[in-house]
Image (cartoon, rainbow, N blue to C red):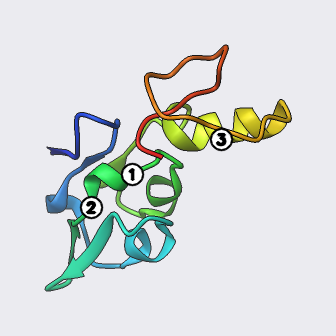
Amino acid sequence: MIRASALNTLEYDPDLCIGCEMCSIVCPHGVFAMNSRVAQLVRPEACIECGACQLNCPTDAITVDSGVGCAAAMIRAALLGRKEVSCGPADVETEVCCEC
């Protein structure tokens, strides 16, 4: 199991990868790329924890806590009618996120 970055909760087990390419297709920030029929983490720091990769991985090779991070903060900000999301430690009151 590979812990992608200290900035997010993404974890990936390349031993479970079957080369379906779904993670590289659905990731909005290009975190994954294919290399010899196995996904590789090429931009782990870019993960916004949206959970698309985990939801589309048929072998559970990817785990991510999609209730935290940039994606969650952007959704909360939009629901509250806020136009800006700043970067920093997660804070429910100000709806900030990391590495947007």
Residue under label 1 = 47
Quarter of image, res 86: top right
Residue under label 3 = 74
Residues at marks 2 and 3 touching, judged by CB atoms closer than 8 Å = no
Q: Is residue 34 left or right of residue 95?
A: left
Label 2: few (<14), some (14–19) or many (≥20) C-alpha neighbours in 10 Å: some
Task: Tell me which residue sits at (24%, 67%) in the image.
Answer: 17
Label 1: few (<14), some (14–19) or many (≥20) C-alpha neighbours in 10 Å: many
Q: CA distance from mark 1 to mark 3?
A: 14 Å
Relative depth, front residue between 85 and 44: 85
Q: Secondary structure at mark 3?
A: helix
- Callout 3, which amino acid? Met
Residue under label 2 = 43
Q: Secondary structure at mark 2?
A: loop
Judge whether 62 appears above or below 38 on screen. above
Residues at marks 2 and 1 touching, judged by CB atoms closer than 8 Å = yes
Q: CA distance from mark 2 to mark 1?
A: 7 Å
